[in-house]
Image (cartoon, grey):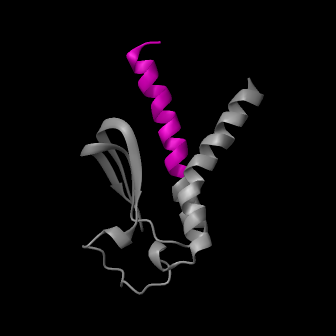
Amino acid sequence: MSVLGAIAVLAVLIVVHELGHFMAARLQGIHANRFSLGFGPILWKYQGTETEYGIRAIPLGGFVGFPDDDPDSDIPPNDPNLLSNRPILDRAIVISAGVIANLVFAYVVLVGS
């Protein structure tokens, strides 16, 4: 497999994983202020109504940022829709959703091929 092919496969897995976290948070009404693929300097970004979407220079991961971790956030610390203020089950769903999304994706790829 070529280097570009390996990066493409890794990128798909990262997108699926991070979308799992992001969708689990958003479906529960939890604020997510960043969705980024990669690490390091920002190559491209788009500011949506609530979330900044970005692609970064080092394609070896990604992250979903929550206002709880952002000191510049305008959301008050006692907002009930912050991840840290949600019940433990809601937080566990968001945290485990990335792995679950990867498992579902692997199943779909194996059954579909």
Left or right of residue 111: residue 87: left
Q: Seen in the image, is 11 located left or right of residue 108?
A: left
Residue at (44, 84) in percent of width and height: 79
Residue 94 magenta-highlighted? no
Residue at horizontal 53 percent and vertical 56 percent from the top: 21
Task: Please say if 43 is above or below 70.
Answer: above
Compared to residue 76, the image places residue 48 above or below, namely above
Pinpoint residue 101: horizontal percent, then vertical percent. Answer: 62, 47
Residue 65 location (% of width, % of height): 38, 61
Question: Which of these two is toward me, 63 or 27?
Answer: 63
Left or right: residue 36 versus residue 100 is left
| Region in magenta | 1-19
* Percent of width and height locating residue 42: 25, 46
In this view, the residue farthest toward the top is 1
Quadrant occupied by the C terminus: top right
For the residue pair 105 and 48, the one nearer the viewer reads as: 105
Query: Up-down: is 97 above or below 90?
Result: above
In the image, farthest residue toward the left: 41
